[in-house]
Amino acid sequence: MTDTKLIASLFDCLNQNQLVLGAAVEELSNWVEQRGSADIVNNVRGALETLDKNLVFIRQGIAELAVAGSLGKS
């Protein structure tokens, strides 16, 4: 496995972790919202928006690393 492929795999795993954590935090924010804590929910949803905004860039970077790794076979 080339270094580039290894890095792409690592970033893919980190991205999956980020998605799972984001989903868990969203579930918690829904639970908090049902109990009437609008300020906390707004803060949490703002943080989740940042995760969503970065997702496209992260996925693009992973795809480019994966392509570069397959081109640079040793």
Image: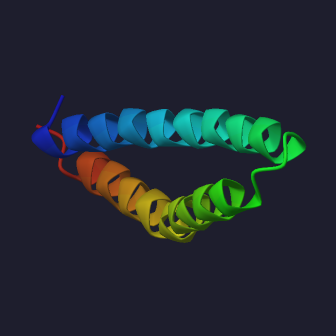
Q: Is residue 14 above or below residue 72?
A: above
How many labels sit on residues? 0
1 sits to left or right of 47: left
Residue 35, x across and y down, in percent? 84, 40
Q: Is residue 57 above or below residue 51?
A: below
Front residue of 56/34: it is 34
Front residue of 6/1: it is 6
Q: Is residue 74 above or below residue 1?
A: below
Residue 3, x across and y down, in percent? 11, 40
Residue 62, x across and y down, in percent? 38, 53
Q: Residue at x 59, y 62 (%)?
A: 43
Q: Residue at x 35, y 49 (%)?
A: 66
Q: Residue at x 18, y 41 (%)?
A: 73
Residue 25, x across and y down, in percent? 62, 39
7 sits to left or right of 45: left
1 sits to left or right of 44: left
Q: Residue at x 21, y 42 (%)?
A: 7
Front residue of 27/57: it is 27
Front residue of 1/71: it is 1
